[in-house]
Amino acid sequence: MKFNYLDSYELRDLFENNLNNFEELLLTEAVNVKDKIQEILQIGNIDLVNNAKKLVIYIIDGKEEELQQFAKQEGIAWATHSIDLSFKLEWVQAIRRTVWYLINEFNKLTKEQLNVNEFFTLEKEINNHIDNFLNAFFISYSTYKDSLINAQREMVENLSVPIIPINSSVCILPLIGTIDEFRTVILEEKVLTEIGELRIQTLIIDLSGIADMEIEVIDHLLKIIDGAEMMGCKSVITGLRAEVVRKMIHLGISFNKKTDTLGTLQQALNDYLLK
């Protein structure tokens, strides 16, 4: 929707003929952002000043569809580079105040001044465009940020439970670092899923990279091994540390009889691949 009470083409001419004044006023309005302009340009190749000018043109011309698309693009860019949202909010509010300054100056040049009803109608149109831009921006930012977080989480999960195929029936699962309750849940899901999809017959679980495990984690690991057996997959445990073995002895628990335990991964590879 174009302005009902101001000629948008004349207003656009006023804006385009006073770009330097617009930029100067905008920078005085955006106190905290003006010192971050070059940094944001370097981080995300986001040109705040030129983007502000583009936004104003869309507002003046009433191009709501282009405004929405622009907001989505901006949201993705800011989410990708994790730029502080407070800068975006301050910047857009500074644009809002600058646009109103522009309209006020334009109104002074027109022969017929806006009456109260015309002013409030115009105020609603302008602010709706800006609010719609902000709303679309934050939705786009949030949606894309969530997708990035989920992708990163999935990557971390895959790295934390790396099942490596050796041949058509044997796979290795080398575990390194700390295994907490959250990781055992990922472990369970990944192991059982991969057994079904890859039709793994023998899964060699190497624990040489695990210094210690809590009792709950050991218990969960035993259940995962039992679950693998139910799916027709034999588990082979290698590299058990003395601390883990000691805990299992004191608790009176052990692996089921069908689970092989070997000292090293190399022994398991010799037994299940070379022989």
Image: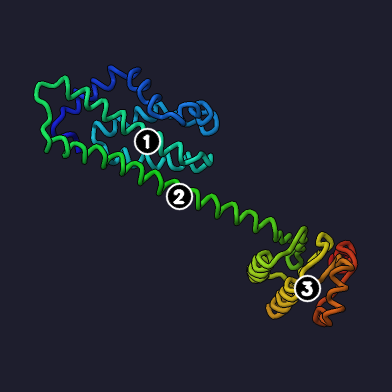
**Residue carrying label 1:** 92
Q: Is residue 128 left or right of residue 143?
A: left
- In what element is the residue under mark 3? strand
Cα gap from disc 3 to disc 2, whole angstroms = 42 Å
Report whether residue 198 is seen.
no
**69 and 30: which is toward the camera:** 30
**Residue 95 x %, y %:** 34, 31
Q: Which amino acid type is shown beneath numbered disc 3?
A: Ser
Of pointers 2 and 1, the one earlier in the residue sequence: 1
Q: Residue at x 17, y 38 (%)?
A: 120
Q: Residues within 10 Å of mark 3 (few under 14, many from 20)?
A: many
What is the image's colouring?
rainbow
- In what element is the residue under mark 2? helix
Q: Is residue 26 above or below residue 185?
A: above
Cα gap from disc 3 to disc 1, whole angstroms = 59 Å
- Numbered circle sitting on residue 235: 3
Would you identify the image quadrant in which residue 154 lies? Answer: bottom right
Of pointers 3 and 2, the one earlier in the residue sequence: 2
Q: Residue at x 33, y 22 (%)?
A: 22
Q: Is residue 244 above or below residue 115?
A: below
Of pointers 3 and 1, the one earlier in the residue sequence: 1
Q: Which amino acid type is shown beneath numbered disc 2?
A: Ser
Quadrant containing the C terminus in the rendered view: bottom right
**Residue carrying label 2:** 142
